[in-house]
Image (tube, rainbow, N blue to C red):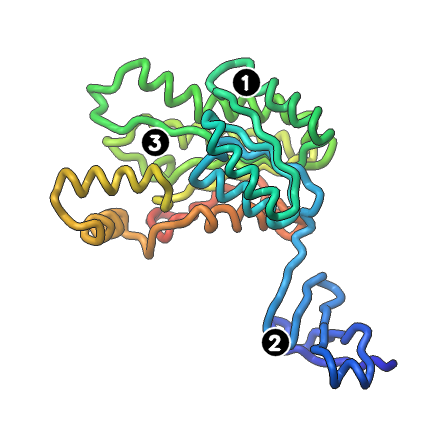
Amino acid sequence: MFCRWFLVGLSHPTRQCRIIGTSDIVLFGLALRIAIEDEGCIFFPWGETGMDLGLTGKVAVVTGSSRGIGRGIALTLAQEGCDVMLTGRDEAALREVAAGVEKHGRTAKYQTLDLRREDAAPALIAAVKDSFGRLDILVNNAGTTKRGDFLALTDADWTEGYALKFFAHVRLSRAAWPLLRETSGSVVTIGGTSGRIPIAAFTIGSSVNAACAAFAKALADLGKTDHVQVNTIHPSYVETERFWRRIKADIARTGKSEAEVREWHRQDINVTRFGTPEDIADLIAFMVSRRGRWLHGATIDMDGGEVPTL
């Protein structure tokens, strides 16, 4: 058996890589497996690559994970090696996502909860502790808010908007913090670009998303002391069931084709394309990994260029 050294022309063209466990016979009979020693990446001669984010065995809570962005986050974290606690109000949908997590060889549990209730957050975190004994990642994703004419929106509409998307984030972060402190874990808040570019037609959502980002920024200050990473992501329009309902409503209202309505919305917010749940999920997987750990107290617009300001 012998060993050779090669130079691999990647982003670091002078980085040395080593062939692992090769011999003259293997060289003729099998493809070579090459590993970059200092990065933990695997490179194959036929072009496949893998990157270890170090998330195997981590435990994540993803709220609003029965569909849409939350579903995409849960499945991506499972693919990266996380066990996942799911939560939402649709038990059938949660069971389907749990099955998807298990297909990746990870453990999935779910709690059917209404996070607007004050007792929901402590109950959810207690279930996490009972099921997994630890918590590494909290993704505060649940929550939608009502659009409409400001003068027509009621106090009940405003209370509803803050109850699920803001106060649920606050209560869950507070309940989860002791477990996250034990593991030097991560909190990710999903807001929305309306928190950066408020508009009259979305006064509740604009206010709630800005409040969520401000809360996360303040929590990140505590996180520096307690070694808990805290960040916010503001997505633009993402291809979810909620967005599809909006597209269908506009098709019915205008009589235009789906393609025409989609293009109108794309031009209206001036983005390169609409996002996917996987776009958000992939950023979170990096963010909460050892590779993204220096991100702290950040608010990231993942928006296809919608937000025009610095």
Q: Earlier in the sequence, mark 3 or mark 1?
A: 1
Judge depth for marks 1 and 2 and give the one in front: 2
Residue in the image at 83% along x and 80% along y: 3
Which residue was labeled with disc 2? 46
How far from the left and from the top, in percent, is residue 203? 29, 28
On the question of residue 220 being in view, the answer is no
**Whole-percent x and y of residue 263?**
23, 53
- First in sequence: mark 1 vs mark 2: 2
Residue 50 point in image, percent of width and height = 63, 62
Residue 211 % position (x, y): 43, 28
Is residue 33 or residue 279 the one in the foreground? 33
| Residue type highlighted by circle 1 | Ala
Q: Which residue is mark 3?
A: 206
Which secondary structure lies at badge 1?
A: helix
Distance of mark 1 from mark 2, alpha carbons?
50 Å
Which residue occupies the extreme left position in the image? 255
- Residue 26 seen in the current view: yes
Image vertical order of residue 36 relative to residue 205, above or below: below
Look at the numbered disc 3 and give the secondary structure of its residue: helix
In which quarter of the view is residue 30 placed? bottom right
Who is closer to the viewer here, 19 or 185?
19
